[in-house]
Image (cartoon, rainbow, N blue to C red):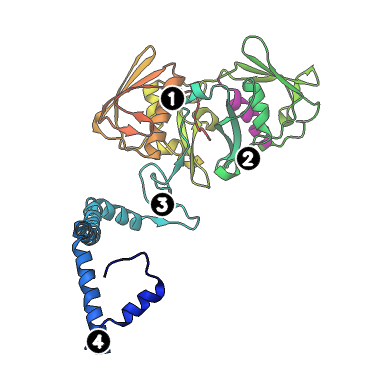
Amino acid sequence: MKRSSNWDEKTIENQLRKLPKIEDKQSKEALFERIQERLQEDQIKERKTKKHWIVPSIAAAAVFFLLLLIVPSFLSERNVSIEDSQPEFRMEVAEEAGDVEVDMNGIASIDAPGITSVDEYYTIYFGAVQPYEEEFYQDQLVKLAVPVSGPAGEFVVQVTLLAEGANEIERFLAVKENFSGEPWGIGNFPSIEINSIFEGKGGVLIIDVPTGSLESLSTAENFAYSQSIIETFWPRFREVELSSDGEPNVFWGQSGPISGFSLEVENRGYYLFESPTGHLFLVTGKSIGAKGNDSSEDVSLQETLEYMKQYESVGNMGYLPPIGDEFIITNVEQNDEVVTITFADGTIFENSPRHQAMVEAILFTARDFGHSYVQFEGIQPTQVGPYFTGDLLEIPRYFNFIR
């Protein structure tokens, strides 16, 4: 049929009617199945054209699945190897913890030479202000002596604190009313009302109090009040001068009128006091009347160190010797600023609060004999608190540092 622009729709319709009749011999069901087959063939052709991205996706999924299986197993084995690296250490800790007995106050305790009741590894010992700490805290350090009740009566413990103030006297005034020693099993500074306090000439500290404010002191208070002042300002000052409302002398309890206290008293040795709360403090030999502190005695450094091993000299008063009987000092050589203390060969110090207190008691004792450094010989070099015993040790100036 040729296309003609003269044909209209009616002519075309008549021509179509003249065409032969076409009949499809397939049933409806067969025709539907044929159509479905053609659709499936088209889908297969479409999948074949997309193979280049389907295969990598399947591979990636397989790798991810394998990682899920392998990684947890690897981590589990790694944890087992780490945990098993120190089985003996864990066992030793567990055994040691099981061997510690706890008393009614909850303080762990075992038997240890030179000390009663408190285990040296559980004892709370504050220690000294190290030289580098002193440089850092130089504008905050202040000493304060507080009374303590012991089996032999009242005595005082000197502690080191941090406070704000332009100088030591201002810092003392800041802490004397506010410090409470109850958490550490010690007392507070006596309630001494002070009008004024200042440094005079020649190392003299001048304290003025209200008239009659100290007249009614008991015997125990008389001792505690005077010793608290003496220990607080020793050895920083040479003398304390007292006055009442500007007038010389103070009526000091049963002692009557006094002009002040001399602080030029030599100290020989340091001992240990264990408070009811389990805290361990150094106390000066002069404050407890320990052997060698009688003014008529002239004892050497080595003799003083030997006294510091004798439980009989202070044990009946409630204090403890800082040096155990097992530590044998064979020689003490004094040479200007340095003193060399030799122990029996093979002596071992442990890194424990008890042995740190022993080291510091020796250091401060050497300082009171005019030395600045201590060298230990004969002992196996080891770490004891902040000290390495093989080094030349600089002697600190402040002890019982409550940070």
Q: CA distance from mark 3 to mark 1?
A: 29 Å
- Mark 2 or mark 3, which is nearer the start of the sequence? 3
* Residue 224 within the magenta-colored segment of the rendering: yes
Q: Is residue 359 left or right of residue 23?
A: right
Q: Which residue is mark 1?
A: 365
Most foreground residue, 121 or 343: 121
Tag 4's secondary structure? loop
Q: Which mark is residue 23?
A: 4
Frontmost residue, 274 versus 320? 274
Task: Tell me where residue 229 sits by quadrant.
Answer: top right
- Circle 4 packing at 10 Å, graded few (<14), some (14-19), many (20+), is few
Q: How far across and how far down the image is residue 392, in percent? A: 33, 21
The quadrant holding residue 69 is bottom left
On screen, residue 322 versus residue 234, left or right, reads left
Residue 337 position in % (x across, y down): 39, 13
* Boundaries of the magenta span: 221-235
Question: Nearer the viewer's eye, disc 4 or disc 3?
Answer: 4
* Residue with the mark numbered 2: 180
Q: Amino acid at mark 2?
A: Ser
Q: Is residue 398 left or right of residue 170?
A: left
The residue that disc 3 covers is: 109
